[in-house]
Amino acid sequence: MKLIFMGTPDFAVPSLRALIEGGYEVAAVVTPPDRPKGRKRVLTPPPVKVEAEKHGIPVFQPEKLRTSDTVDEIRRISPDLIVTAAYGQILPKAVLDIPRLGCINIHASLLPKYRGGAPIHHAIIQGEQVTGVTIMYMAVGLDTGDMISKVEVPIGDDDTTGTMFDKLSLAGAELLKRTLPELIAGTARAVPQDDSQAIYSPNINREDEKIDWNRSSKDIWNLVRGLNPFPGAYTTWNGEILKVWVCKKPEDLAPGADRTSESSTGAGLKPGTVIGADEDGIEVATGDGSLKLLNVQPAGKKAMEAAQLVRGSSIGKGTVLGE
């Protein structure tokens, strides 16, 4: 078996490593060009490139696969199979048609839910309690190909996008190990996706990151978890960005409970108003009660416990966030 692997971030590394350790011939790796990172803008290779070079695997780094000479190189290599994981580009038909066994993708969701570039973020933001990994044949559309195998992975209350990236990365590698022998033997059964059940998860934009205090406490809690550790949920305070990294899980209201009654913490206050600020954190009024912020990051500073911000600033009861 001669393979080509395409991927970019840390998420893809365990799958590449599984192919190498499984004895498959990885003839080449395709990944984006090195990018400047950090405040000093140091040119940094993608994690997949770093892993490939450890094993002496040739690496191609086209800016755009569709219009690059890399397509000709793939034809020259003539792989039996192409495996992708978080590569970040849609493969053109000219590439999809090259391998005799096709092209497969390791996607971090239970398709057809959460097609697109940010499936882990959106699953948490939407309050899902279970997500997973799907291995699918690649088609011209966005994550629309027939599904070969799946594995479910629960999302716990303490999970963030960061922790789920790690869990799903390992789950994807294990699923690949189990799936490849069946695919090679011709015994794998591919199932078409039900497009009527499709949910899309586009890349997160700046507006998605902003906290709307009119939303429910649980919605905001999920948003904060879903954007941790990147890119981060934010509100504003004194006209500057205040990132929110960790909140205390809000208590679920009993069915039929009055969300607007005076007994609800924060009731009658403008959403975004600080109800209390002390050593336990910063409690903020929301659309259905309140939410306690535990870890925040003011503009130009490092992340800190909310209590530390309270001790060293003027934030306190009556402060309005988000204005």
Image (tube, grey):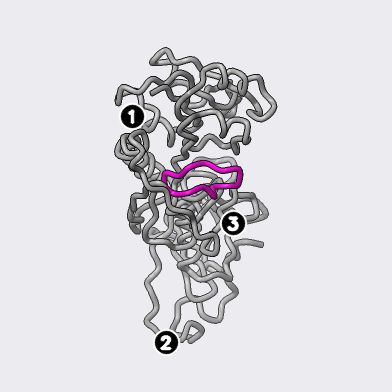
Give the residue displayed 48% in from the left and 42% down from the top: 137
Point out the stretch of residues depicted in magenta: 134-147
Q: As drawn, which residue projects farthest toward the top?
A: 56
Give the residue displayed 67% in from the left and 54% down from the top: 239
Residue 44 location (% of width, % of height): 54, 22
Q: Secondary structure at mark 2?
A: loop
Q: Please state, as top left, top right, bottom left or bottom right, where the N terminus lies in the image.
A: top left
Q: Secondary structure at mark 1?
A: helix
* Residue 18 - label: 1
Residue 310 visible in the picture: no
Label 2 or label 3, whichever comes before in sequence order: 3
Please tell me whether residue 291 is drawn above or below residue 11 in the rendered image.
Answer: below
Q: Is residue 274 left or right of residue 106?
A: right
Main structural element of the magenta stretch: helix, strand or loop?
loop
Give the residue displayed 43% in from the left and 36% down from the top: 11
Label 2 or label 1, whichever comes before in sequence order: 1
At label 2, the amino acid type is Gly
